[in-house]
Amino acid sequence: MANFVIVPIPTSSEALDKLLPEKFGNASFSLGNGSWLVSYDGTTRQLSDEIGITDGSTSNGVVLSFAGYWGRATPDLWEWINEHSK
């Protein structure tokens, strides 16, 4: 599975905040600012289609895939990334 960052535009989306944990369970992780990490077996386009960003039915936003990462964050974020980067 690949890891993705979902950034809603504007910076908060109640629809995505409800949809992503329901649809992906622990394969989703809220960054707490409206943005999410999602582990998904597909492309950025497929994920965008599936969660309603492509057609705007859920939210406007950007879906980005990522492989590398670095920074400072809470331990639970690093644990999620480590678990879903295998």
Image (spheres, rainbow, N blue to C red):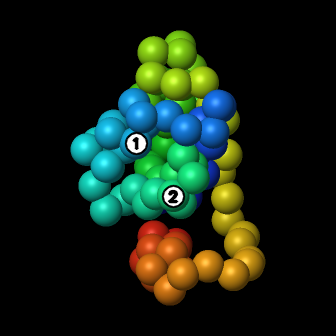
SS at mark 2?
loop
Amino acid carrying label 2: it is: Gly
In the displayed structure, 68 sits above or below 27; it is below
Residue at horizontal 45 percent and vertical 23 percent from the top: 58
User: CB atoms at circles 2 and 1 under 8 Å apart?
Assistant: no
Relative image position of residue 75 (x, y in whole percent): 50, 86
Amino acid carrying label 1: it is: Asp
Q: Given the current orientation, which residue lies at the most extreme bottom position?
A: 75
Q: In this view, does 6 lie to the left or right of 26?
A: right
Relative image position of residue 11 (x, y in whole percent): 63, 39
* Residue under pointer 2: 32
Residue at horizontal 45 percent and vertical 80 percent from the top: 76
* Residue under pointer 1: 17
Which mark is drawn over residue 38?
A: none
* Residue 83, quarter of the rendered image: bottom left
Q: Is residue 24 left or right of residue 63?
A: left
SS at mark 1?
helix
Visible in this render: residue 9? yes
Q: Is residue 75 left or right of residue 66?
A: left
Q: Which of marks 2 and 1 is nearer the N terminus?
A: 1
Relative image position of residue 71 (x, y in whole percent): 73, 78
How dense is the environment of label 2, judged by Cα within 10 Å: few (below 14), some, or many (20 and up)?
few
Relative image position of residue 35 (x, y in whole percent): 57, 49
Q: Nearer the viewer, residue 50 or 86?
A: 50
Q: Which of 41 and 84 is in front in this view?
A: 84
Residue at horizontal 49 percent and vertical 43 percent from the top: 42
